[in-house]
Image: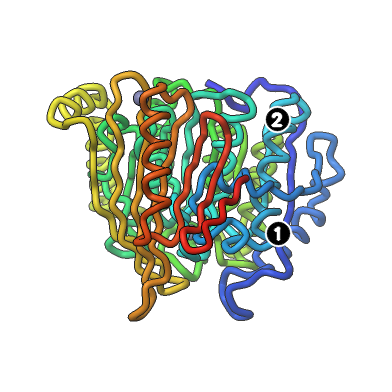
């Protein structure tokens, strides 16, 4: 398995606090999230160490975004420069990793991304575009990686990342989080496990509010690490949210900075991308310092919050049994993943279809989707999504999206192109999209003006 253990080289860091981007001036997702962390890291002298190298961020290209998202009406409308820099930071570290310049890296950037899904009508859960998914698709397109594992350790379910890779058996998405019955976005249950061809390559571990370091390390040691050993990904990526911390104002968990650092040491991710974490002074500086030291192979045992005493948080027997039972359920899904896929495919025809409703809490948009995936015997199959975004009484946009996967067969390519030609004539839609991952070309057609735009 890939990882930093035994690897040579430095740990790459990028800080990008995004001074000019905030949902509102008093919103918890604001620039101070990273400023205290930066102070703490400088105070600890981490930046002077030979094991650590700071990189300057770059802008992601619009194409890097279009490779993942159908942005409505176009990429420019959904991203600011801050979004492009946050996403671009992860790509800078990807290049440094691939060239052997670093052994691992951590993009400490905002705005976060893991609630952003394939179609982006607006902002949900503080996210417009999914930095992690943009990183995954970049690594696959530019460096030819096939199997990638994304481990989401944010307290909120990584519902956007899950949705983007739902049908992809080569991206293993594991998210542990506070139980969705008790926290936004209200999803991430054990029975959410991927599309028919990728069953149990999406795994969710909902945890009871109040879960401590002990509980999370139980999940890591008994479920996540053994599954990674079996999956054997080219790369392990970590959506590193820090809102499981016991002082986080938006959630109810009991993790410590030391628990997070140990988690990082065991998981040994190649790249980490910051997600949430809103305890600006009491958690983020300590958690981030601990993670960076663990990534750089340094001693992090002294990293401790000023008010933390060992044994402060004790997990109840009930909680312990609940976590053990969830881990056993997820493990059994993973163990029978191939059978699950065989059974699902035997019951389906040429296409798999589903309807979805997606709520954008930040922008108050409701989206209705109808998705179809061709269950092609010769390739991963093309996908179409018909999507309507609505706010209040008005329809924002009615769009049609077509995605051609990498290594698509010629039948799927031809049929997907036919769908595009047919739908650009359909006045029902305002925009029609063609995402051709095989050729790395991305088209947007404005049905009213008859203009086509490409990335
Ligand atoms: Zn979060
Ligand atoms: Zn095909």
Q: Viewed as shown, does residue 150 lie left or right of 416? A: right
* Figure quadrant of residue 82: bottom right
Tell me: is circle 2 under 8 Å from ligand 1.
no
Dot 2, how many residues are within 10 Å of its Cα: few (below 14), some (14-19), or many (20+)? many
- Mark 1: give few (<14), some (14-19) or many (20+) Cα within 10 Å: many
Residue 173 on image: x %, y %: 41, 38
For this rendering, which residue is in front, 261 or 445? 445
The residue under the point 67% across, 69% down is 21
Residue 391 vertical position relative to residue 368 in the rendered view, above or below: below
Q: Which mark is residue 133?
A: none
For this rendering, which residue is in front, 371 or 278?
A: 371
Q: Secondary structure at mark 2?
A: helix
Vertically, is 320 above or below 168? below
**What residue sits right under mark 1 in the picture?**
37
Residue drawn at (35%, 63%) of the image: 388
User: Which residue appears at 30% of the width and 47% of the height?
Assistant: 371
Q: Please tell me whether mark 1 sits on a helix, a strand or a loop.
A: helix
Instruction: Please state which of residues 87 and 51 is positioned toward the viewer in this rendering.
Output: 87
Quadrant occupied by the C terminus: top right
Residue at (50, 30) in percent of width and height? 148
338 left or right of 121 in image: left
Query: x and y percent of residue 33 in the render?
Result: 65, 65
Question: Can residue 69 be seen in the rendering of this structure?
Answer: yes
Snapshot colouring: rainbow
Q: Is residue 127 left or right of residue 413?
A: right
| 3D distance between C-alphas at marks 2 and 1 | 23 Å
Question: Which comes before the other along the chain, label 2 or label 1?
Answer: 1
Q: Position of residue 86 (x, y in %)?
A: 66, 53
| Image mark for residue 97 | 2
């Amino acid at each position: 398995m890939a990882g930093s253990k035994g690897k040579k080289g430095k740990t790459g860091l990028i800080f990008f606090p995004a001074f000019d981007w905030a949902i509102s001036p008093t919103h918890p997702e604001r620039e101070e999230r990273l400023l205290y962390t930066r102070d703490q890291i400088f105070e600890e002298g981490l930046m002077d160490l030979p094991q650590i190298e700071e990189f300057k961020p770059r802008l992601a290209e619009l194409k890097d975004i279009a490779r993942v998202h159908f942005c409505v009406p176009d990429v420019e409308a959904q991203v600011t420069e801050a979004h492009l820099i946050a996403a671009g930071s992860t790509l800078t570290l990807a290049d440094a990793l691939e060239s052997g310049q670093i052994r691992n890296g951590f993009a400490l950037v905002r705005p976060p991304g893991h609630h952003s899904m394939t179609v982006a009508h607006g902002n949900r859960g503080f996210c417009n575009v999914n930095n992690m998914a943009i990183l995954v698709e970049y690594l696959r397109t530019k460096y030819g990686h096939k199997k990638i594992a994304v481990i989401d350790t944010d307290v909120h379910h990584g519902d956007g990342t899950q949705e983007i890779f739902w049908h992809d058996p080569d991206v293993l998405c594991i998210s542990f989080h506070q139980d969705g019955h008790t926290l936004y976005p209200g999803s991430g249950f054990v029975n959410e496990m991927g599309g028919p061809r990728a069953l149990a390559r999406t795994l969710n571990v909902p945890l009871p509010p109040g879960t401590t370091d002990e509980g999370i390390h139980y999940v890591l040691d008994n479920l996540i690490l053994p599954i990674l050993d079996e999956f054997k990904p080219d790369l392990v990526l970590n959506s590193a949210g820090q809102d499981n911390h016991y002082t986080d104002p938006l959630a109810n968990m009991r993790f410590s900075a030391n628990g997070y650092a140990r988690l990082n040491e065991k998981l040994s991710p190649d790249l980490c991308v910051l997600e949430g974490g809103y305890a600006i002074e009491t958690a983020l500086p300590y958690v981030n310092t601990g993670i960076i030291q663990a990534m750089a192979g340094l001693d992090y045992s002294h990293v401790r919050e000023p008010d933390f005493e060992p044994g402060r948080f004790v997990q109840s027997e009930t909680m312990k049994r609940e976590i053990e039972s969830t881990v056993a359920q997820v493990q059994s899904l993973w163990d029978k993943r191939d059978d699950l896929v065989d059974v699902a495919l035997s019951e389906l025809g040429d296409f798999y279809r589903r309807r979805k409703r997606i709520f954008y809490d930040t922008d108050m948009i409701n989206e209705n989707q109808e998705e179809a995936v061709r269950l092609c015997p010769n390739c991963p199959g093309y996908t179409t999504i018909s999507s309507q975004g609505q706010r209040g009484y008005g329809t924002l946009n009615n769009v049609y999206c077509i995605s051609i996967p990498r290594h698509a067969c010629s039948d799927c390519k031809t049929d997907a192109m036919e769908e595009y030609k047919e739908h650009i004539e359909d006045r029902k839609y305002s925009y029609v999209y063609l995402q051709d991952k095989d050729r790395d070309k991305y088209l947007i057609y404005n049905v009213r003006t008859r203009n086509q735009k490409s990335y």
